[in-house]
Image (cartoon, rainbow, N blue to C red):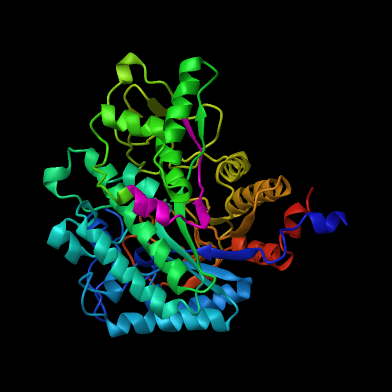
Amino acid sequence: MEQDKKQMPAGFLWGAATSAYQAEGAAEEDGKKRSQMDVLSAGTGFADASVASDHYHRYKEDIVLMKECGFTAYRFSFSWSRIFPDGTGEVNAKGIEFYDDLINRLVANGIKPLPTIYHYDMPMALVEKYDGWISRQSIEDFVSYSEFLIRRYGDRIKDWLIINEQSIIVEFWKKKNYIPEKYRNDPQIKFQINHHMNIAQARVSRLIHQLVPDGRSGAAIGYAPIYGLDSAPENMLAMLNAEDLKNHYFLDIYFHGTYPVGASHYLQEKGMAPVIEKDDMEIIRSGKLDFLGVNYYASKCVRFPDAAHNVRTEAESNLSGKKGEMGAYETMPDFYQYIKNPNADTNDWDWTIDPMGMEYLLRDIYQRYHIPIMITENGLGARDVLVDGRVHDDYRIDYWKKHLRAIHRAIQMGVEVQGFLPWSFIDVLSTSNGYQKRYGLVYVNRDDGDLKDLARIKKDSFYWYQRVIETNGASLFDDI
Ligand code: BGP
């Protein structure tokens, strides 16, 4: 009896995740044109997206590996500019052929395709035409692109993640969007982009409900539970402020169709609130989502900004991969200031390692919104080394084991968690750190400066995960 309890529920989805620009490569091949991420990833000093992990050419071999590991689901994203090279108009037959075959092979192998419609990669053509998401026209074009996908794949795909990590698109607005010079000093733009995405996502959610029998709409949110530095009243208030602006500002829209009042008033006071047109909120309310994908890596910590730090500061990543070299922590004046959590360990890029945060966020989100949840990303970025054809990533196994136990605990506490799709399946191009920072179950033999042979090599975590899947989670408890 006890054995049964220490497993994930029947039907729990097991798999892993990638995104198009980080995995596929072939950035300008077979009719695909550049996306903003192809442009933004170039000239950073790290690898760019032109070849990435060559998934576009090796997806068949990659699906064989998924099957060998026991996946029952795979999260990938569609590349908008592979399907519509100019963002609108002519469909690219070769692009469609690729996704047709990918999806059909997944289905034939008993692996549920879980797609993301948008993972940072606005077609460059639309950036050039009207500044991408900054223009309201992006809503129309995104809805048309999505409608095409829903009509084409709605018979094989029921669950749709529409937008990936809106919270991160706002936080790192100049890295996840191509922002023309004239807007770069105007932070209101990031909330305007977000508002356009909210309308677009709600309209696509409606289409899923209309066109896909039993279809479910979702989003993958980049989510960090936010802790106050201590029990000083001002730090507890900072925690509430940050929860409101960084978390509820997105999830209240998805599941209640409203912006939280505190965060909205704060943005008004600071001149950063989005322009909301007459019917916008009604559209948003009419397209609520059915489930949530949670991308969880790290929790965050805040204090109330002291006088010396009470100026708006934007987050910057750690580019060196040396602990303590985080570029900058975000501050919103009179509201909150992010700081390093003095009570938690981090990885080499200063991302907190906090498995308990997984139980915390699952219970918190479920209690607030009562929606089914899937973990759509979770993982540990590390400098893996290949030694004699093996990668001994015991640190990653330890990370996932603890996070999975926390998920199991949350399920025992009543939370509806339907699957685990960690980041990442194969090593992919990191959004900030090229191939120096890897996440995969499968090593890809290349580095930033040298493409080598791009061979796939199963890491120790691959074999460990295979056993976890085989036992539906029971092996997580073998050693306790
Ligand atoms: C999430 C993204 C992914 C992925 C991951 C790791 O924000 O959805 O695309 O890259 O974070 O981040 P990074 O590559 O910066 O280490």
* Res 434 quadrant in image: bottom left
| Image location of residue 215, percent across then percent down | 51, 69
Q: What is the quadrant of residue 476 in the picture? A: bottom right
Residue at the image position 67 percent from the left and 46 percent from the top: 410
Residue 256 falls left or right of residue 51 = right
Query: Which quadrant of the rendered structure holds the N terminus?
Result: bottom right
Q: Nearer the viewer, residue 329 or 388?
A: 329
Residue 371, given in percent of the width and then of the height, sits at: 57, 52
Q: Quadrant of residue 268?
A: top left
Q: Nearer the viewer, residue 335 or 79?
A: 335
The boundaries of the magenta stretch are 281-302
* Residue toward you, 71 or 81: 81
Along the line of sight, which residue is nearer the eye, 428 or 35?
A: 35
User: Is 299 a magenta residue?
Assistant: yes
Left or right of 335 in this view: 131: left
Q: Residue furthest right?
A: 1
Q: Is residue 295 magenta?
A: yes
Above or below — where is 453 with respect to 263? below
Residue 61 image point, x, y percent: 49, 80
| Residue at x 37%, y 50% (from the top left corner) | 166
Residue 271: image x %, image y %?
A: 23, 31
Identify the residue shown where x is 60% and y is 39%.
360
How many discs mark residues in the rendered view? 0
Is residue 388 visible in the rendered structure shown here? yes
Residue 445: tell me if it is visible: no
- The relative height of residue 91 versus residue 406 in the rendered view (above or below) is below
